Amino acid sequence: MAMAIGSPDGGEDEVNSTINTTPLVDVMLVLLIIFLITVPVVTHTIPVKLPSERNQLFKTHIEDVDLSVNKDGDIFWGQKKVADTNELLEKLKVVSVLTPQPEVHIRGDQNARYEFVGKVILTAQRAGIAKVGFVLEPPAKK
């Protein structure tokens, strides 16, 4: 066996700077065939009617409890100020035994410390309230 080193005429070989795309095309065609075969299998699933998106306005029920916490940590039940968390606990215990149990909606001032709102949540938990939610300002429409 002979081995050729260099070109027979003694000149330098030119450098081939082009990319051979044939293997790339072969791989892409194989992947395309695989995807065409597997897509119908994936799309045939159990027929389930998915819920559609809807945007409902927030409707307050009369029996829901609206609590507000201002930036100074004062707690308000509706429009009336509550003296402290002990008084709030007693009021929430009375409400927690109602059937169906009302939801507690907390409106916390943006500048209020987390500690003030946390005390209201803890008091609601200690009273046995199952549903506690936060009332937020909706984002601006674009």
Image (tube, rainbow, N blue to C red):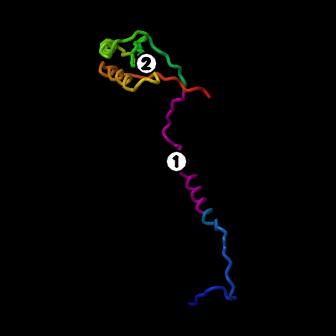
Task: Characterize the local packing of mark 2: few (<14), some (14-19) or many (20 or more) Cα atoms within 10 angstroms.
Answer: some
Q: Main secondary structure of the magenta part?
A: helix
- Locate the C terminus and report the quarter of the image it occupies: top right
Compared to 107, does 79 lie above or below? above
Task: Characterize the local packing of mark 1: few (<14), some (14-19) or many (20 or more) Cα atoms within 10 angstroms.
Answer: few
Q: Residue at x 30, y 13 (%)?
A: 90
What residue is pinned by disc 1? 41
Residue type at numbered disc 2: Asn
For residue 70, the mark is: 2
Q: Residue at x 66, y 73 (%)?
A: 16
Which region of the structure is painted magenta? 26-53
Position of 81 compared to 56: left or right? left
Compared to 34, does 50 lie above or below? above
Residue 125: % across, % down: 32, 22
Number of the front mark, 2 or 1: 2
Instruction: State the CA–CA distance, disc 2 to disc 1.
Output: 57 Å
The number of callouts visible is 2
Which comes sooner in the sequence, label 2 or label 1?
Answer: 1
108 and 28: which one is in front? 108
Outermost residue on the front side: it is 72
Residue 34: % across, % down: 55, 55
For residue 104, which quarter of the picture?
top left
Residue type at numbered disc 1: Val
For residue 3, which quarter of the picture?
bottom right
74 and 10: which one is in front? 74
Mark 2 and mark 1 in contact? Answer it, CB < 8 Å. Answer: no
113 and 128: which one is in front? 113
Q: Residue at x 56, y 90 (%)?
A: 1
Q: Is residue 95 a member of the stretch shown in magenta?
A: no
Q: Secondary structure at mark 1?
A: helix
